[in-house]
Image (cartoon, coloured by chain):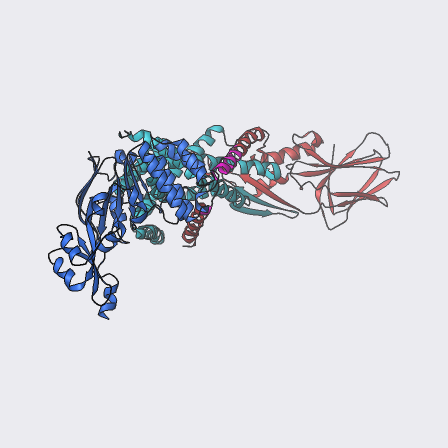
Chain colours: A cyan, B red, C blue
Amino acid sequence: MSLSTINLFTNVKRQLNYKLKANAGILFSLVAVQLLAALLSYNGTVSIGWGSGTSFISLRLVSGDIIIIFSLIWAFTAGLIVAANSQRYDFVFVTNRLSSNLSSVAVLFILSVGGGVSATLCGILLRVYLLLNNNSISSTYLSPYILLIGICSAVLYSLLFSAIGYFLGILSQRNKAYAVLLPALFFGLLFVEARSVGSTRHILSVIYFFIKESSLLIFALKILLAVALLYSAVILIANRMEVRQ
Amino acid sequence: MTSILFILVLIAAGYFLVSRIKIRLSHTRVYIGIYMLLLMFAVAAFYYLGKTGSSLALENSEARESEFHRFLETGRVEHLKGIRKLGQWSFTYRGKELALKSTKDYFWTVVAIERKNASDETIEVISYTTGMQLKDADNPPGVKLKDGQLQLTNPPPVEIDLYATVADFTMTQFNAEKSVYNVDHSLAQNILGNQVLLVRIPAQLQLTVDETVSVIEQK
Amino acid sequence: MQSVECNNLTKRYGSVYAVNDLSFSIAENSITGLIGRNGAGKTTLLKMLAGFSLPTSGTVNIFGQNPFNNLLVSANLIFIDDEMVLPENMNLGEILKAAATFYENWQAGLASGLLDYFSLDLCSYYPQLSKGMKSTFNMILGIAARCPITIFDEPTVGMDAAVRKDFYRALLKDYLQQPRTIILSSHLLGEIEDLLDNILLIDAGEKRLHLPMDELRSYAVGLSGNFKLLNELVKKEDIIFQQQLGKDKIYLVVRNRNIDFSAAKLKGLEISPVAANDLCVYLTAKHKGGIDDVFKHN
């Protein structure tokens, strides 16, 4: 019987197709997460009151921030789940570690685009609902250009969060202890750094590296660089990993 | 610390939610499709509605207030841009004298008196406001004619719930225009605006005004 | 040509040798039975062949290549076991369609025919299936993929006798239509005996036998009769198994090399063939006397 020859990218394409279907539930949960976040956003993030003799005015500021933050947490968990699923589902059919990881990256890329775009648009849905049903004073007008900037940056953030999730997911496949140790280390350090003033702030400076960047282009480069580093590390780590144990 | 814990709980809950949701592939396609349509529709609606949105609240309140007073003093208040009628009353009155009185301690709204040229035995009262048109916030004062008295009652106190939508952090990070809303006197003034009760009386009517009402005579 | 070649293959977990210094090769287009008791190292061996895990030492070659992390090997080898995880949100039809995209030789008609025959509904979901039905579905994947190397690790777990029989028949029929290298692991030889070309018997991670089936059938012979007479006859032979039958009577399974059968018959000893399945059990037993040994010492 003659052997089938196989090209890496053909196989990545096949796996992408399969894994998008196998992980479709993640996309569904995105809808649930965003609608829940929209509901929580409805009461506004900041509420200020002002009263005079006969009137009382309360102003709630509403934005899509909660929706986006929830969507980023979703992106992180999507990374974890795609990592776990790729170990479970991929090695049933044709794959090697590289094509498994490349197809996961492609899946997470698509999920991040979906997450970032829908998170921003869900914020628009919330605004429309408020406009139609409530006393809305001058809403900050979002020009299509600003909307596009919002979408791009939400997609970029999602890419980063899903890559971190995937990295942790694969690492914890290697050793379960990582799943607990790394988040604990991260949040522990963050907590310590946030409290102490003047000492070196590694974690905070990493966070500021992204959130203080005001040029979208440089921000995109930073995110893509970080994502590339995370995925390269994953591919290196996974290359000698045993599967289906 | 609590916020870190909150985030951890969110991640755990999120992981639980995302990994537990088991939904058939064929159903997923339908739900995602509906959601996408909804979002597309929202964007279309947003830009359709966006053009009608007013930015009145953010204009300079002092300029608007002084403009209101200028118009008021020159007797052209009904021609002020953006002024709205809240209510209108008309009474037939054959008496020679009329007393203007507040039913409570003090009537907050300025009353502008305008003498008509004719003696047509009709009193017209119109309530105007320059405040924003908001749901459940338009409360005209009470006006009643009884025993030779025009009795004025303050409108019931209003509670106005306002929303201002601001840009997401993903937008403001790359866009210098950070919108900050402060609820201060200026904003409140713009929202509530100025009110005036225009009272048109026949030329010969003798008017006595109580100290509980402040009155401007129109020239 | 050899499809599978292992040289001094060893896999160690901590201090336990799951596979120990195993060397063998499997010819192309043959059905090999990998027989061993529970914990003999069958699954460990097969996972190294499939490239899922790495040997501690030694080499595995599949089509002359190292299977670990090898896309070419993966495209030409399918590994079916009862721990396969398939997406929970896709129905069987959708899974079959996905599988079809991965394998060049996929037989869609055969897959749906088998699914129909075993009354599996295309619209049902994998987690809802019983253990036996899962095994049946896995088996259908394995057969329909028509990979040059097809590995079944304990494929019949949970299947009832009728389905097991049908499965082996389906496997044989498809093998005859499209010969390929099939490795079938089982702790029992009995049911698959007629299917196999070769048998690879392993015990405690080590190779005990690797023979064509017909050689296995004449590998050993059973002798029974008087204890003293028998002992004299088989002095120089390998005794594989012995069992006390009566006061003076004993049953021995002896390696069939140069036993003088005519002398045995003259002495009134009974000579009988040994069933292949029994032989495998005897060969992998820890004690020559089997379970009887336990009672002898107490």
Q: Is residue B26 magenta?
A: yes
The magenta stretch is B20-36
Q: Is residue A1 visible?
A: yes
Front position in the image: C263 or A6: C263
* Quarter of image, res A71: top left
Q: What residue sits 59% from the left and 32% below the top? A: B54
Front position in the image: C213 or C174: C213
Front position in the image: B98 or A192: A192
x and y, in percent, of residue B47 in the image: 55, 29
Q: What residue sits 34% from the left and 32% below the top? A: C103
x and y, in percent, of residue A173 in the image: 31, 47
Q: Is residue C164 magenta?
A: no
Q: Report the magenta stretch's main SS.
A: helix
Q: Tell which residue pokes out farthest to the front in this image.
A: C266
Determine whether, in the image, residue B108 is placed left or right of residue C264.
right
Q: Tell which residue pokes out farthest to the bottom in this image.
A: C298
x and y, in percent, of residue B71 in the image: 67, 32
Determine whether, in the image, residue B112 is placed left or right of residue A99.
right
Query: How many circles with numbers are drawn on the protein?
Result: 0
* Quarter of image, res A235: top left
Q: Is residue A112 visible?
A: no
Q: Tell which residue pokes out farthest to the right in this image.
A: B94
x and y, in percent, of residue C102 in the image: 35, 33
**Quarter of the picture holding the N terminus of chain A:** top left
